[in-house]
Image (tube, helix red, strand yellow):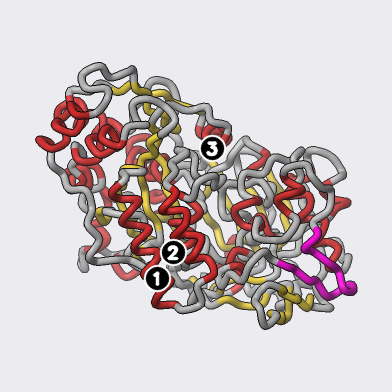
Amino acid sequence: MKPVRTLILFLSALLLLLPLYGAASAAPALQIDVPLNQALVLDGGESTNPRQYDPATTHTAGDKRIYSGLVSFDPQLNLTPDLAESWDISPDGTVYTFHLRTNAKFHDGRAVTAEDFIYSWTRAASPELGSDTVLTYLGDIVGLPEVVMSQSSEISGLKALDDHTLQVTIDAPKPYFILKLTYATAFVVDRANVESGPDWVYNPNGTGPYKLREWKNFEYMIYERNPEFYLGQPSIPYVVVTMYQGDSMRMYETGDVDMTGVYVSSVDRFLDPTEPMHNELLTGVDLCTSYVVFDVTQPPFDDIKVRQAFSMAFDRQKYIDVVWHGRTLPARGIFPPALPGFNLNLKGLPYDPEQAKKLLAESKYGSNMPPIVFTNAGTGSYVDSDVAAMLQMWQQNLGVTVTVENLEPNFYYDQIYAGNHGQLYSTGWCADYPDPENFADVLFHTGSPQNNGKYSNPALDSLLEQARTERDVTKRIGMYQQAEQIIVDDAAVLFLTHSLSYQLVKPYIKGFTLTPIDIPIERYIWLDGK
């Protein structure tokens, strides 16, 4: 997630701003050499950061058109075989034996082997690559952390029993481990392709359902279906992703794109039954939580009372009503409503300005607050509306002034993971797999690569470590709910919202399902009458 695995708050703010700038950014119709009536046309951004196109280093869910892994999710979020046709798990739950499909090939026709996975995962763990995600998704594999720490050059827990049999040994029986292999870090890459030069990501030799046919910077990317795809070629011949071609909702209305998200300011329009495109609107609950990170290693947020004060000085409902037009859900804790472990009885920190002032006065900083910097993804001196709302509340309720520092959006997370940020920054996390471990443990365990605020609580760590191997589902869920309450009470972060999805989909797109986790959806849909 991912992460958040995306810039949730930045992109959401962008959705608010695009209606203001859409007309100015309008561009002529694309001139491309594929029949658009045989293409799924989408609107997308383009990062200038090459690390975002490498499955091992991306902070997104990865390009599931080009790349694939051992397992995947279907539209109902069932775990399904992918490059692995089947697998066996040892009685003690620590050894996974994956049987690769004999017809699985890279786009250039070379067969995929077990050694390709060993190469891909060893590369992802290499200190030279500096992946921010490899320990999160593959760190359970015996010997992989030693590679990350330069203590070994080989992952001892990986063995190629033959060309089509991969044995993976993990450090303890963890019921969620195989779910992690759906994430991009676990995808297979071709060694010759990767080692051909630094521009390999722009000419990828993947294994997925589509090949990258053409990439024209700042204009479009064209994907062409892979006729040799091991699960059968996709129904849609082409996928065209437009870039910087104008306002996506206006392009949807003119028929220039086939799907688009809906700005929160426009949701009411499409919910109206009299709207001609009302029946093209799909809605759903995401598995996402947005929040503000307190860097507990930097004053004043090393003091729990300061963190609690900032949390209780935040009027969440007003924030939702004004900034998000009421089209999102309040987050009292880390687990989104549709996730196993969501707790209706969770005791969140309430909006209480008077108690917030009292806590701030009782903190070791009192009225002697150090300068506070809020790091955000943006350009120039512009302050996003969501950030401005928070700053105004803290100023009004606590008398604290916070300065905003904008970072180049394409490199925002590179800087966050490098520790180059202020005491506060906004982010979010969307489920990579439907398990509470993906939120509580990944984001708040001491030393977790995704715990960028460096929050630490030994009691929480102990609870999370027990939950990792607990076989009783009821007990395990109970442990994660206890963990969430500790996280809330410690004000480890300031919880903001759980997002909702609003998506417009043309009626000639068939088989589409709105999923809260990113899946290779083009494998499951087709065009009828475009």
Instruction: Name the residue beneath numbered marker 3.
Output: 413
Could you tell me residue 341's position as x and y percent?
37, 68
Report which quarter residue 165 is drawn in. bottom right
Per the rendering, the mark at residue 477 is 1
Q: Which residues are magenta?
A: 156-169
Taking the image as shown, residue 517 lies to the left or right of residue 70, namely left
Q: Disc 1 or 2, which lies upstream in sequence?
A: 2
State if disc 2 and disc 1 touch (CB < 8 Å). Answer: yes
* SS at badge 3: helix
State the SS at label 1: helix
Measure how far apart labels 2 and 3 are at the Cα level: 23 Å
- Classify 10 Å Cα crowding around label 2: few (below 14), some (14-19), many (20 and above): many
Residues under numbered marks 1 and 3 in contact, where contact means CB atoms less than 8 Å apart: no
Q: Main secondary structure of the magenta part?
A: strand
Secondary structure of residue under mark 2: loop
Mark 2 touching mark 3, by CB under 8 A? no
Give above or below for 350 relative to 181: above
Give the residue displayed 45% in from the left and 33% down from the top: 377
Residue 32 magenta: no
Three-letter code, disc 3: Tyr
Residue, disc 2:
436
Residue 158 on the magenta segment: yes
* Horizontal relation, residue 286 to residue 101: left or right: left
- Above or below, 440 against 15 in this view is below
Q: Residue at x 32, y 32 (%)?
A: 303
At a point 39% along the width and 43% down the height, the residue shown is 9
Residue in the foreground of this view, choosing between 250 and 184: 184
Q: CA distance from mark 1 to mark 3?
A: 31 Å
Residue at 54% in and 69% down: 469
Q: Is residue 112 visible?
A: no
